Image: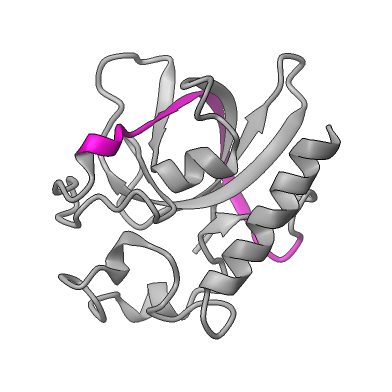
Amino acid sequence: MNRRFSIFVAMIGLAIALVPGGCGGEDEPTTASSSATSGAESPAESDSAVVEGPVEEDASSPDVAVTEVLEGRASYYADSLAGNSTASGEPYDPQAYTAASRDLPFGTRVRVTRLDGDGQPMASVIVRVNDRGPHRDHSRILDLSRAAAEALDMIRAGVVDIRAEILAD
């Protein structure tokens, strides 16, 4: 458990170092920061106080309202899909904190929490929906980017149980 906590703390530090200027703005780590769409974010997205990426151990931030909670399974995108267009038109960026959902609107921010075998939270990450899927297995409710999967320590497992909290705008 100590090793897992150390990795989690290191990832938090890396995420903070990679987000210039703190919260929000067009430099936040999303696929919209690619050269093809840089600066094309809507004002509502760039002014948001919720930044994609790993969240601290206590993922129940009182200042972010949750509109809906879903439970199911999640997988992550294959590395070979990097650069391919998502359903929203953005290129898939494995290093961005993004997800595919069959039902949620593009731009929706979701706090994804990996659950252990007993349903207890392990790690959380905030992602932005920019694609459609998963299509084959309806027990899976989200497909996550590589960065989100790494933050949830799910690379080896491939498919994990999750809680998805839809965050208010």
Q: Is residue 111 above or below residue 44?
A: above
Is any atom of residue 106 visible in this view?
Answer: yes
Q: Image quadrant for the N terminus?
A: top right
Residue under the point 25% across and 22% down: 135
In the figure, is residue 7 to the left or right of 2? left
Please report the bounds of the magenta region as a residue range. Answer: 62-80
Q: Quadrant of residue 40?
A: bottom left
Q: Is residue 128 above or below residue 134?
A: below
Residue under the point 70% across and 46% down: 7
Q: Position of residue 86 (x, y in %)?
A: 19, 47
Report if residue 69 lies within the magenta region: yes
Question: Which color scheme does this rendered protein use?
Answer: one colour
In the figure, is residue 27 to the left or right of 116? left
Residue under the point 41% across and 42% down: 146
Q: Position of residue 161 (x, y in %)?
A: 58, 22
Q: Position of residue 32 (x, y in %)?
A: 29, 66
Report if residue 49 lies within the magenta region: no
In the figure, is residue 92 to the left or right of 140? left
In the figure, is residue 28 to the left or right of 43? right
Q: Position of residue 43 (x, y in %)?
A: 35, 81
